[in-house]
Amino acid sequence: VEEDEGGIIGRAVEIVNTARDLIGALLGTGDRGRSWREA
């Protein structure tokens, strides 16, 4: 399957950011989630 690497990377980044937000919410570390997004 040939796709633009940018599109795949973009999806991966969105999934990772969403996962971090969910984990941060579960652990109560919202600040960490924000810092990860800013980095």
Image (cartoon, rainbow, N blue to C red):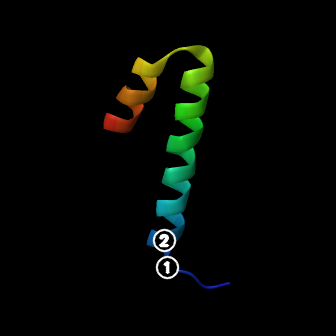
Amino acid type assigned to the residue bearing label 2 in the image = Gly
Gap between marks 1 and 2, in whole Å? 5 Å
Residue 35 drawn at (x, y percent): 36, 27
Q: Amino acid at mark 1?
A: Asp
**Residue occupied by mark 2:** 7
Q: Identify which residue is drawn at 54% across, 24% down.
A: 24
Of residue 28 and residue 1, the one placed in the foreground of this image is 28
Which disc, if any, is residue 4? 1
Q: x, y percentage for residue 29? A: 50, 16
Say which quadrant the N terminus sits in: bottom right
Q: Residues within 10 Å of mark 2 (few under 14, many from 20)?
A: few
Counting from the top left corner in percent of width and height, residue 23 is at: 61, 27
The outermost residue toward the left is 38
Q: Are marks 1 and 2 in contact (CB under 8 Å)?
A: yes
Locate residue 36: give its quadrant: top left
In the image, 11 versus 9, the foreground residue is: 11
Q: Secondary structure at mark 2?
A: helix
Indicate left or right for 17 with 1 as reference: left
Residue 2 shows in the view: yes
Label 1 packing within 10 angstroms: few (<14), some (14-19), many (20+): few
Position of 4 relative to 31 (above/below): below
